[in-house]
């Protein structure tokens, strides 16, 4: 908890000239990139607003760069440090990222949607380029030369061809100078990078391997108590009656504020015990179980889903479908799955007078600040949210429930309070990747070209809905549903079910047309970058020279999402007992210029491993009474022995800006495996998970 | 009657916390003897984290499924969430904080750091300790044997390949350069 002091007001709510940059950080130079309003959709798709970036160069030459993004294990802390080091021409070890502190960092919508590289990296690069321009100007004045004659590298400047060098720290000594990026000093192009794009040792590596890294759940404050939340027995149930609360006993008390009921005590166990004693009655809720879920989702379209709707139509699908020789009508299903971050949700709140500080592992600190301020009835400027090192999120840590509970309980108790989920709460009271259904109706003409494409997703979401194929007659749309289980974001949320359905359907059509799955895609794709990863994956895997062996199969799938392009080839075996084994996954991936190759490889390989769980066996089971398998012993996630050989070919294309890479590498794994299972057995599996019990069914559903 | 709950708290039948302490028990952790209240059913995980402040040992599931709480008890890998004070009193316990010897990082730690065999890092202390215990027993393992030995430890970021790379590198270094494990 070595965070910087608290400013008078959050800096994102304070005009730049009034921020106490130099009082808090010391003298020197601050360069900032102003915020961006919502930009029109570009080639990378959705372009949300961002709060800009700022960085400070101190008289010791240290650089502190501020970003509203958070680090929850995806490695952007080092990647962004590399971007700053590159533009500023300093060793990467000299750059410290300050992330996810709502008092000090630029406003940010949240760390999701693979936006850290496309949004935070250019903003920081722009601020850094502006800072370097200013350093050159200061040096030029001192050396009595033109700024263009000043060279800079390794944190030093010198007059071209002469010495001695002057360090950045010396240049800014005695300064309290604030400059803003003006569009005049543009960041360098990736083709000229000398620091970014190379192997880099994480400056924090030692913390991770020695146990010194303090995660949110490792933090404590003097006098800290522990809190617990009273949860409804089923999603959507509300308190019907509660009666009088028991009187406080020493430090232990039950707290009710509107719908919120919680308890605080000397230990989490004691707080939970207090809640178990409450004579609470809940409203009954009529929810479907697993057997009825499909009909329920189809008949309960959600009303407030405009934010996640996509629609596209052209030509005459029905006529083209009726006239085509090769036709497919099928529904593809994806189960509810859980994020299972290894560190469960945890928050610690402390009040100083009327102002709260909340340490919480969240992907959306600024949203949590807003939610907490509203719930607590205080101005947003009185709530500081700090994201400590966090044990992963995968889209599962967007909400503010633990943060708000901790803050309410801390205020009531007059002491710092920590609220941490146990694993069962993590399963029951977070949210899941939605269950979804995709209805596909598609057809191919005699020359192997897609002529009709109807694609309707129920409850999965809109990402990757449109797909990369050229089809003249198409009708594509999605609708969300009122889910009986809480549902929300997830790593490559809708791109997973949509790519599973699309790439399975394309495989079915290719085989029905008598075409090789790669040749079929070639015939129907225009995107050269997607074709490139397809060819590279095929070459690496030996697609063209594969041989047909009994019980052995190959499957191919591809897609683009959030600016990343992936092609995955799965090789599977199915034994006499119909037991499935994924022998290897071979992928080629391209997401523009690679900033941090080692970390990118970890992200891409990890995405394959995570995708394998949802592809093969992960599923939340439930009845009308709620989730049945809310424990790790009952909800299986991938382990060492589950993983096949994973071979990844990373394509570094410096002609394109760096896209995020946390999500897109996941999306082709499940369909590649489903297609390989068909290749090996002739059985088409259209539901995820594909083999919950480990065996391929003898006939498809 | 004190019963152990899954979260490790001791709760009485009326729900209130029961604190029935009959003196103190000695616990040997990382070469130091600590006196902790004699609550024989309290989990080692809770004692390490809450009472001794050794937060490198992580909570992940409370039922021995994830390995985030792996420690060494008499040199063998063990799950701190499944062990009670009564079971470990008197035994020498090593946590991740105690692994660092006088010479700095161990071979396993160094290999994890160099390779970047972590993403969020929450599983890393447990992985490092599990791998350490394994390599001390089996200095020349195959990759498949390492995977089998570590299978009880979850990495939800699924950085399994990198972790296997790191353990392989540590094994070679320990064997050939005599780096301490």
Image: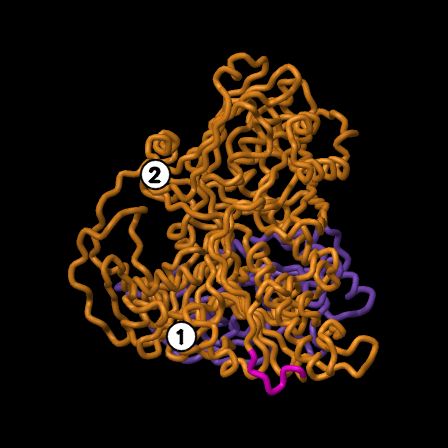
Chain colours: A orange, B purple
Q: Chain of mark 2?
A: A
Q: Check if residue A175 falls in the magenta segment.
A: yes
A570 or A478: nearer the viewer: A478
How far across and down, in percent of the image, does residue A195 sit? 72, 64
Q: Secondary structure at mark 1?
A: loop
How far across and down, in percent of the image, does residue B109 sit? 68, 67
Q: Is A665 above or below relative to A26?
A: above
Q: Check if residue A419 falls in the magenta segment.
A: no
Q: Is A69 above or below relative to A463?
A: below
| Residue A61 sits in quarter | bottom right
Q: What residue did someone put label 1 on? A: A9
Q: What residue did someone put label 2 on? A: A302
A70 or A676: nearer the viewer: A70
Camera-side mark, 2 or 1: 1
Which residue shows up at 30% across the image and 67% down it?
A: A408
Per the rendering, the mark at residue A283 is none
User: Image check: A411 left or right of A75?
Assistant: left
Which is nearer the N-term, disc 2 or disc 1? 1
Q: Residues within 10 Å of mark 2 (few under 14, many from 20)?
A: some
How far across and down, in percent of the image, does residue A598 sit? 69, 57
Which residue shows up at 50% across the image and 53% down it?
A: A112
A301 or A165: nearer the viewer: A165
| Residue B154 sits in quarter | bottom right
User: Image check: A573 left or right of B85?
Assistant: right
Q: Secondary structure at mark 2?
A: loop
Magenta stretch, residue numbers:
A171-177
How far across and down, in percent of the image, does residue A246 sit? 20, 66
């Amino acid at each position: 908890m070595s965070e910087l002091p608290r400013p008078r007001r959050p800096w994102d709510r304070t005009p730049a000239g009034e921020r106490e940059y130099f009082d808090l950080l010391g003298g020197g130079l601050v360069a900032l990139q102003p915020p961006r309003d919502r930009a029109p959709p570009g080639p990378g798709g959705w372009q949300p607003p961002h709060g800009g970036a700022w960085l400070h160069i101190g008289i010791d030459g240290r650089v502190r760069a501020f970003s509203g993004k958070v680090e929850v294990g995806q490695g952007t802390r080092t990647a962004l440090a590399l971007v700053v080091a590159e533009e500023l021409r300093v060793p990467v070890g000299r750059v410290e990222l300050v992330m996810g502190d709502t008092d000090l960092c630029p406003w940010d919508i949240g760390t999701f949607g693979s936006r850290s590289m496309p949004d935070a990296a250019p903003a920081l690069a722009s601020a850094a380029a502006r800072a370097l321009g200013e350093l050159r100007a200061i040096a030029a004045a001192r050396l009595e030369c033109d700024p263009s004659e000043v060279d800079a590298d390794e944190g030093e400047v010198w007059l071209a061809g002469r010495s001695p060098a002057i360090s950045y720290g010396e240049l800014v000594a005695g300064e309290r100078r604030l400059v803003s990026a003006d569009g005049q000093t543009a960041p360098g192009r990736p083709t000229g990078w000398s620091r970014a794009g190379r192997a880099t040792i994480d400056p924090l590596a030692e913390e991770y391997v020695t146990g010194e890294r303090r995660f949110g759940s490792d933090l404590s404050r003097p006098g800290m108590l522990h809190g617990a939340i009273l949860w409804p027995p089923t999603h959507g149930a509300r308190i019907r009656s509660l009666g009088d609360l028991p009187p406080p006993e020493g430090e232990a008390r039950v707290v009710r504020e509107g719908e919120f009921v919680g308890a605080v005590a000397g230990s989490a166990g004691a707080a939970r015990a207090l809640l178990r004693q409450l004579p609470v009655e809940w409203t009954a809720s009529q929810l479907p179980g697993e057997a009825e879920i499909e009909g329920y989702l189809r008949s309960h379209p959600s009303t407030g889903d405009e934010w996640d709707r996509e629609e596209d139509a052209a030509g005459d699908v029905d006529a083209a479908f009726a006239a085509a020789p090769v036709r497919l009508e099928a529904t593809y299903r994806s189960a509810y799955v859980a994020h299972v971050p290894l560190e469960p949700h945890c928050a610690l709140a402390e009040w100083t007078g009327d102002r709260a500080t909340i340490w919480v592992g969240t992907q959306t600190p600024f949203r949590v600040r807003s939610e907490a301020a509203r719930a607590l009835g205080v101005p947003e400027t009185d709530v500081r949210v700090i994201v400590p090192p966090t044990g992963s999120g995968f889209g599962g840590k967007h909400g503010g429930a633990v943060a708000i509970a901790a803050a309410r309980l801390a205020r009531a108790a007059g002491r710092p309070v920590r609220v941490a989920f146990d694993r069962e709460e993590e399963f029951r009271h977070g949210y899941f990747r939605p269950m979804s259904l995709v209805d596909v109706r598609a057809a191919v003409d005699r020359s192997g070209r897609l002529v009709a494409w109807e694609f309707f997703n129920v409850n999965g979401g809109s990402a990757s809905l449109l797909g990369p194929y050229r089809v003249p007659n198409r009708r594509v749309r999605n609708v969300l549903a009122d889910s009986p289980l809480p549902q929300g974001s997830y790593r490559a949320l809708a791109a997973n079910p949509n790519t599973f359905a699309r790439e399975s359907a394309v495989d079915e059509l290719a085989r029905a047309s008598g075409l090789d799955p790669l040749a079929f895609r070639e015939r129907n794709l225009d995107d050269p970058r997607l074709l490139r990863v397809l060819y590279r994956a095929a070459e690496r895997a030996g697609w063209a020279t594969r041989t047909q062996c009994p019980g052995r199969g190959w499957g191919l799938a591809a897609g683009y999402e959030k600016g990343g392009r992936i092609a995955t080839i799965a090789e599977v075996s199915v034994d006499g007992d119909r037991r499935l084994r994924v022998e290897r996954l071979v992928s080629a991936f391209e997401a523009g210029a690679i900033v941090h190759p080692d970390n990118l490889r970890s992200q891409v390989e990890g995405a394959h491993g995570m995708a394998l769980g949802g592809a093969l066996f992960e599923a939340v089971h439930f009845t009308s009474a709620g989730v049945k398998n809310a424990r790790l012993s009952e909800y299986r996630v991938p382990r060492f022995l589950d993983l096949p050989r994973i071979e990844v070919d990373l394509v570094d294309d410096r002609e394109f800006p760096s896209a995020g890479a946390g999500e897109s590498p996941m999306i082709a794994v499940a369909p590649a495996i489903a297609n390989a299972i068909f290749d090996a057995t002739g059985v088409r599996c259209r539901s995820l998970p594909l083999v919950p019990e480990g065996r391929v069914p003898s006939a498809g559903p | 009657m004190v019963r152990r709950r899954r979260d490790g708290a001791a709760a009485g039948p009326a729900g209130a916390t029961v604190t029935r302490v009959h003196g103190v028990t000695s616990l040997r952790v990382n070469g130091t003897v600590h006196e902790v209240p004699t609550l024989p059913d309290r989990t080692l995980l809770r004692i390490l984290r809450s009472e001794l402040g050794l937060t490198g040992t992580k909570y992940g599931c409370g039922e021995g499924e994830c390995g985030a709480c792996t420690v060494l008890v008499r040199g063998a890998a063990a799950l701190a969430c499944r062990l009670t004070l009564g079971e470990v009193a008197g035994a020498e316990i090593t946590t991740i904080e105690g692994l660092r010897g006088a010479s700095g990082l161990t071979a396993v730690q160094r290999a994890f750091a160099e390779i970047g065999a972590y993403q969020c890092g929450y599983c890393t202390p447990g992985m490092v300790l599990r791998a350490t215990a394994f390599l001390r027993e089996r200095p020349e393992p195959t990759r498949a044997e390492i995977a089998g030995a570590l299978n009880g430890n979850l990495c939800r970021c699924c950085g399994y390949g990198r972790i296997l790379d790191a353990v392989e590198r540590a094994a070679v270094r320990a064997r050939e350069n005599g780096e301490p494990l």
